[in-house]
Amino acid sequence: MKTDFGYLTYCSNIHAGESWADHFAALRKFIPSVKVKCSPDQPFGIGLRLSNEASIDLAKEGALVEFKDWLSTSDCYVFTMNGFPYGGFHNTRVKEQVHAPDWTTNDRVNYTTRLFDILSQLLPAGMEGGISTSPLTYRYWHKPEELHNVFEVATMKMIEVAKHLKRLHDTTGQLLHLDIEPEPDGLLESGPEFIDWYKKYLLPLGVAELQKEFDLSVAEAEATIKRHVQLCYDVCHFAVGYENHQEVVNKLSALGIKTGKIQISAALKAPMASGESRNPVIAAFKGFNESTYLHQVVARTQSDGFKRYPDLPEALADADNQDIKEWRSHFHVPLFVEDYGVLKSTQEDIVKVLDLQKTKPFTHHLEIETYTWEVLPDGLKLPIDESIVREMKWVINQLNG
């Protein structure tokens, strides 16, 4: 739905269904009721997540025609997609495999290109479209001495997609962008790391490739890269890393690097008191220790340094470490709840980022991404459509406040 500060939606990765038939059934079940309650008088935008399997099925002409007809009759449209999870994302162990296949592979390139071809068919005239994706690879799959080569290989694969987007732009006029999503333990896990990669790898390699392929000037090639490769600003991920949102946004603006979308999401946090006083916090975090998704923890030390744990079990094993004064965990919790007893959410970070967007908009796309409903502790589970509506209305109130 259109707001004064960008197009707002929620990501359909909240709905199970890895085949297109199953996912389309979930969209038909939930989207109409959400639209009636959140966007009754205007078209409703959908943030579509397709697995590789579903993308192959939907790319077939008959399936696309059927989906476009449903969008039209339902007064809905698609303007952003989540291309991060390639395979199964529900009812299976995902963990670090959410990055697989990574950006060193042709499978990732083919999947992402297919998604863009689908989005090109679905995107309303005059709108730009974006697809978020993995931050190159999972850091711990590679030895430190291999990383320079991994950066180069993965970046060149992304440039192949950027070339495809330029060709689409030249033939259709559509502005489509690949939105890189830093997250803890990704090869790019923070705003500064994304910016460093953009300057050190993407621009030098991309400019050279686009000059050679399209006979562009340096300035034209750089502008093309900046048009088609952008940032996905996942608030949960940046909050887990204790990032200063104003500084990140200012640096991006100064460099002319664009943000394709803000993913509106919340993490868990809590101060770690000394001695046995932290036991209630440890017990509360144990309640969120589930086996489907990665729940990386970034801890702040007494000297204001950071200690990183690849998942919640590793953090819990070190829970008595008295050098730690705060935990933040990558667990996408509902936006509209800030207080979980001894645990809190990083809702405040969302408010800060939305305030930056309201003061000086830096993206056109806003996407709520809370995908953990199935694995939340029982006391937090509500019907999915009711929860989506509460999240949408909470964000709308923040934008209008």
Image (spheres, rainbow, N blue to C red):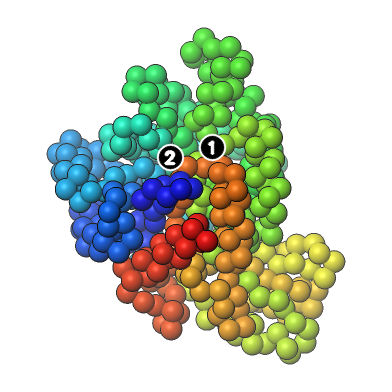
Q: Amino acid at mark 2?
A: Gly
Q: Are marks 1 and 2 in contact (CB under 8 Å)?
A: yes
Q: Amino acid at mark 1?
A: Gln
Q: Tell me, for residue 379, which label it has, or none.
A: none
Q: Position of residue 367 (x, y in %)?
A: 44, 53
Left or right, residue 393 beside residue 220: left
Q: Give SS at disc 2.
A: strand
Q: Give SS at disc 1.
A: strand
Residue at image location 38% in from the left, 48% down from the top: 2
Q: Position of residue 358 (x, y in %)?
A: 56, 50
Quarter occupied by residue 107: top left
Tell me: residue 401, above or below residue 48. Answer: below
Left or right, residue 312 beside residue 167: right
Residue at image location 37% in from the left, 62% down from the top: 14
Residue count near mark 1 (Cα–Cα under 10 Å), binned few <14, some 14–19, many ≥20: many
- What residue is shown with label 1? 230
Residue at image location 52% in from the left, 23% down from the top: 224
- What residue is shown with label 2? 130
- In front here: 315 or 215? 215
Tell me: residue 152, above or below residue 171. Answer: below
Residue count near mark 2 (Cα–Cα under 10 Å), binned few <14, some 14–19, many ≥20: many
Q: Answer yes or no: is residue 230 visible.
A: yes
Q: Position of residue 205 (x, y in %)?
A: 60, 24
Tag count in the figure?
Answer: 2
What is the spatial separation of the Cα atoms under label 1 and label 2, in whole angstroms? 9 Å
Q: Position of residue 252 (x, y in %)?
A: 65, 39
Left or right, residue 49 beside residue 330: left
Residue occupying the far bottom of the picture: 276
Disc with the residue nearer the chain's start (1 vs 2): 2
